[in-house]
Image: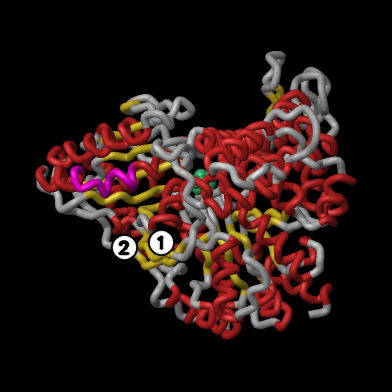
Amino acid sequence: MSWEGVIPSEEVIAATEELLKTAEKVGADTWQQRVRNQTPHCGFGESGTCCRICSMGPCRISKKAPRGICGCDVHGIVARNYLRFTAGGAATHSDHGRSIAHTLYKSSPDSDYKVKDEEKLLRIAKEWEIETEGRDIYDVAHDVALAGLNEYGKPFGTQRFLKRAPLLRQQIWESQDISPRAIDREVSQSMHMTHMGCSSDPEALVRQALRAGLSDGWGGSMMGTEFSDILFGTPKPIDTEANIGVMEEDMVNIIVHGHDPSLSEMIVFYANDPEMIALAKEQGAKGINIAGVCCTSNEVAMRHGIPMAGNFLAQENVVLTGACEAIVVDVQCIFPALGPLSKCFHTKFITTSHIAKIPDSEFIEFDEANAGENAKKIIRLAIMNFKNRDPELVNIPKQKSKATVGYSVEAIKKCLDGVTNSHVDELGTMKPLVDAVKSGVIRGAVAMVGCNNPKIRPDSFHVDLMKRLLENDILVVVSGCSAQAAAKVGLMDKEAAKYCGEGLKRVCRLVDIPPVLHMGSCVDISRMMVLASDIAKDWGIEISEIPLVGCAPEWMSEKAVSIGNYVVATGIDTFLGVDPYTKGSDQVRGFLQSGIKDWVGANFIVNNDIDMLTTMMIEHIEEKREALGI
Ligand code: MSK
């Protein structure tokens, strides 16, 4: 199959090499160099067999020393590390959700934050049995936000959103004792269980990892997604562009980076202010160009069509273009390296959250009360910095691709309704998609998520996998940095349908969608959980029976481990290209890669050979079809 319209990896590598030459010229440190400095990695750390939970150690497990000083064996140590890894991710995603809930609570008609999707607000209020009849919309918003905030610390009961799952899935969670209770409780109990002198039984620790993960995916992340939609609008298909070439040589370039859309929404809004545009022109620029990196980018691309400059491992590249007036960050996935790196250029590195305070940055605190004012302050700083560019250092690689993004669950249903007129209620149905899968026109779907990891040439696993899946008539839904990997090379261009297998090509053309559907940021993997639930309900089968698998080929963060746990616990087999530091224990690997299938109907598959991983995914989908008799 020829993919001549998609940017080839050699061109991507060549563009990065060019930027690295600039880094060398200004004496800047880059992740590529730091990887060399850190190689080889510590074998104990890599296999998860180092314990530094108390100060008797650190203890490292080897043949000579099979137990730590407390007597914990390798299985307990690996499992404790794995649970702490998960808890870190669950806490991070969920705290993001909490912060959006606070923003919703403070929304009002005369503040910077207003309710944009009233329909979704009312739907959630109804779902949560909050009175809506005859009430002011902001009173409802405050009650929904308050109820959401209480999900973090309620003394009794389980997460409200669990009821969105098919009944059978809810029963599995109940019977396995992994229905997540208060979100903060699951995180803090994970820390308690892993404290010195508590759990060392790998089974109990893995079970809690699933539960903590579920508190993220069906709790904190789901609130992050839903409340963001209420405040900023539920995404619908919108055209944009992606890759480093979206930076503009003659404009003030402001990069938004991180995860929380509260800040970037304000930046995007005020960058369109005529007063700001006039100021940029006064300074000799043609205007203001906002572009994004990481999941903040996904958020504003999905809602406003803001171009995506790159994903996780491209964050230094935007500064290396020499044309970045400001890189404005909120929380998560931000390299501390941006501090010293931006000092080698004219770039202003602006941090905005107490959660992500980084040396060598300018801190402009951002909260609901000062949002508009501080967004304007940041934009002004960037504009006034335009004249400080060193033209000698400006080099923006020409690469960019067209992309159509914004496929929330609601948008996917609407696209399907548009073709089949199968509209059954105001929320639509997944039935046309189910029919296409049943008939074999589409063989199945892969939910591709996760980061870049320097252990893998950036984006190569994501892109190679996607190409092969598309050729095999497998629909790909994506989020996070995986989404940007696809968009950067052109796989979200509707034209890319021509490279797919005949069946998928037909569906894409008929429904007018690209073959890779952008579902959002990493908290938006919760959208995929709702999608899978709706498919299962409309099909009348259990989630684990759907010809659907999850995949995180280049993951690196704790958040990704938490995601993996809730995706698997939702019944979706998940393929990883990087091991989550579990190689040291055959028991822990045994649970994660096989044993938990008996609990939740799905497990992890880990393989760093991309061809094998793809083949196994395709086989898995075909096996599920066979089991369903389709
Ligand atoms: S930004 S968690 S590198 S997906 Fe969500 Fe990308 Fe992974 Fe961060």
Give me the residue at 72% from left, 70% from top: 621
Expressed as whole percent of the image width and height from the top left, the position of residue 225 reads 57, 48
Give me the residue at 58% from left, 48% from top: 121
Q: Quadrant of residue 619?
A: bottom right
Q: Is residue 334 above or below residue 243?
A: above
Give me the residue at 76% from left, 71% from top: 539
Compare residues 137 and 283 and report the one nearer the observer. 137
Instruction: Say how many tags the image has.
Output: 2
Q: Is residue 496 left or right of residue 92?
A: left
Expressed as whole percent of the image width and height from the top left, the position of residue 177 reads 86, 41
Q: Is residue 478 left or right of residue 328?
A: right
Q: CA distance from mark 2 to mark 1?
A: 8 Å
| Residue type at numbered disc 1 | Lys
Compare residues 322 and 495 and report the one nearer the observer. 495
- Please give the range of residues in magenta: 267-275
Residue 232 visible, this orientation: yes
Residue reaching furthest to the top: 56
Q: Is residue 222 above or below residue 507?
A: above
| Residue type at numbered disc 2 | Gln
The CB of the residue at mark 2 lies under 8 Å from ligand 1: no
Residue under numbered circle 1: 488
Expressed as whole percent of the image width and height from the top left, the position of residue 339 reads 34, 31
